[in-house]
Image (cartoon, rainbow, N blue to C red):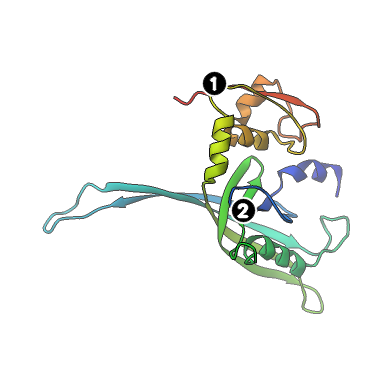
Amino acid sequence: MDAQAAIKLPFNLKIIPTTKEGIPFGVPFLAMFNPETFSIKDEVEWSSKCAIAKAGDDPKYVRVKPRTFTMEFVLDGTGVNTNGVKIPVTAQVALFRAVTTNVRGNIHRPPYLLVQYGTFVNTCIINSSSVTYTMFDMFGLPIRAKISATFTERTVGVLNDILGMLSSPDMTHVIEVDKINLLPLLTHQVYNNQMYYLQVARINKLKNFRRPLPPKTRLLFPPISTD
């Protein structure tokens, strides 16, 4: 892996198993290549009961459904992106399934997930996934595949409550960078919303805020308006 790839690594797609409260645990899935496509779907449910002999009616709002998002990304076993080290595609698929789909004995269900890709951070569950094998070696073993996976956003109640208290609008936070060294992730940790990272970068006069922050960096997270 070259230096440029190493710099981009923290922004690559990660799928992290978590507890119900959103706390990471276990081995994450780290994508070798970033998604080829990434789509987000918002859906609003309406109720429309049209009376007999009427042409139409005014739909009544019911609810906003949880967002769903779909990612497609490539798995490669040729060593092209790992300095010649060939990681079998079948092993990569097995790890993906272990993280996202396999039933965990201690919770009797597939794990809850945290998906992070660049500045996108989302607590979710997986709905479905499909694997398409696209290249094979002389023995018929797959050496390249494409995964398409769909997730549904979920709200982490306890974690959101804690973050809400810590992120009270009348509180200012000073955080020293430790293990979490990406500004969007830190912003999500403080405000429960990574979309404020540009404002935080401006206040802290960060120019290269898309790169990992050096350890021991101290950042100011100001109060936010809830109006």
Decide if residue 76 is on the left or right side of residue 21: right
Question: Mark 2–mark 1 contact, CB under 8 Å?
Answer: no
Residue wearing tag 1: 170
- Name the mark nearer the viewer: 2 or 1: 1
In the picture, the quarter occupied by the C terminus is top left
Residue 135 coordinates in the image, percent (x, y):
73, 70
Classify 109 as above or below 205.
Answer: below
Residue 211 coordinates in the image, percent (x, y):
75, 35
* Residue 73 seen in the current view: yes
Residue 106 coordinates in the image, percent (x, y):
64, 63
Q: Which amino acid, mark 1?
A: Asp
Label 1 element class: loop
Residue closest to the far right: 84
Label 2 element class: strand
Mark 2 or mark 1, earlier in chain? 2
Rendered image quadrant of residue 72: bottom right
Q: Residue at x 61, y 53 (%)?
A: 113
* Residue 192 seen in the current view: no
Classify 154 as above or below 205.
Answer: below
Q: Residue at x 60, y 36 (%)?
A: 194
Q: Which amino acid, mark 2?
A: Leu
Residue closest to the far front: 106
Q: Residue at x 25, y 53 (%)?
A: 48
Classify 73 as above or below 142.
Answer: above
Q: Residue at x 72, y 67 (%)?
A: 94
Which of 87 and 103 lies nearest the eye of the viewer? 103
Q: Residues within 10 Å of mark 2 (few under 14, many from 20)?
A: many
Cα separation, mark 2 vs mark 1, equals: 31 Å
Looking at the rendered structure, which numbered label has been put on residue 113? 2
